[in-house]
Image: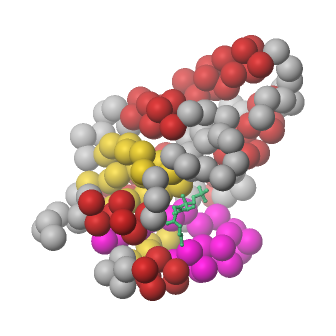
Amino acid sequence: MSDSRIAVYAGSFDPIHNGHLDIVQRCRKVFDQTIVAVLSNLEKEPTFSIDERVEMIDQELEECDDCEAQSFSGLLVDFMETVNARALVRGLRAVSDFEYEFQMALMNRRLNPEVETVFMMPREDYIYLSSRLVKEVFFLGGDLDGLVPSRVLDRLARVRDLSGDSEPR
Ligand code: PNS
């Protein structure tokens, strides 16, 4: 086990938004290294491929030497072992997140008692933000100013233009 404090911040990130990036910055205050772990085998077909999701995150974090994005498949606790991490970070937005997060934290603890789940709350401005809502609002023509990095907006526009309809996937 390495001495450095490594955080794994895991999720689907389809796509990354400012609420996620806010959590990464909070991780950086507490941990030596932050690995943004992007789940590749989503049950539902993602809007962005695993390579695109990892690339988008790396682009937003290019100034942060202590952060990187990595894809994973299979059990998250197994991935954490491969990168020598014990701290699993999850963003907690509202009470509605709690039940799902509670179940995951306890299951992960059962799978590997060495793993500790750490919950972090994003800035209040992002408390209602989710990737699902970002996509819905974007494809219906709503304003996402200040909620999503401009490069991610450009990627969403590309998906919209390629799909030819207003609400892809
Ligand atoms: O952004 P999401 O979709 O809420 O992230 C969920 C994620 C990726 C953290 C979760 O689905 C996960 O860890 N999947 C990997 C498979 C796994 O380990 N399942 C058991 C979790 S208790």
Q: In this view, does 154 lie to the left or right of 86?
A: right
User: Residue visible at 30% across and 40% down?
Assistant: 64
> Quadrant location of the N terminus?
bottom left
Above/below status of 2 relative to 108: above
Residue 74, horizontal then vertical, whole percent: 46, 59
Q: Can residue 128 be seen in this view?
A: yes
User: Compared with residue 140, is residue 24 higher up or lower down, i.e. above or below?
Assistant: below
For residue 96, which quarter of the picture? bottom right
For the point 61% across and 50% down, which residue is it?
Answer: 42
> Could you tell whether 69 is left or right of 125 in the image?
left
- Residue 125 shows up from this direction: no
Q: Residue at x 72, y 15 (%)?
A: 162
Q: Residue 35 at what x, y percent from top left?
A: 34, 52
Q: In this view, does 154 lie above or below 36?
A: above
Q: In which quarter of the image is residue 14?
A: top right
Magenta stretch?
86-105
Q: Which colour scheme is used?
A: secondary structure
Q: Regarding ligand 1, which quadrant of the image does it lie in?
A: bottom right
Q: Position of residue 122 (x, y in %)?
A: 56, 58
Pick the residue in front: 167 or 145.
167
Specify the quadrant that holds the C terminus. top right
135 left or right, relative to 153: right
Number of numbered discs: 0
In magenta segment, residue 163: no
Residue at 35 percent across and 70 percent down: it is: 87
Does residue 77 appear to the left or right of 92 in the view shown? left
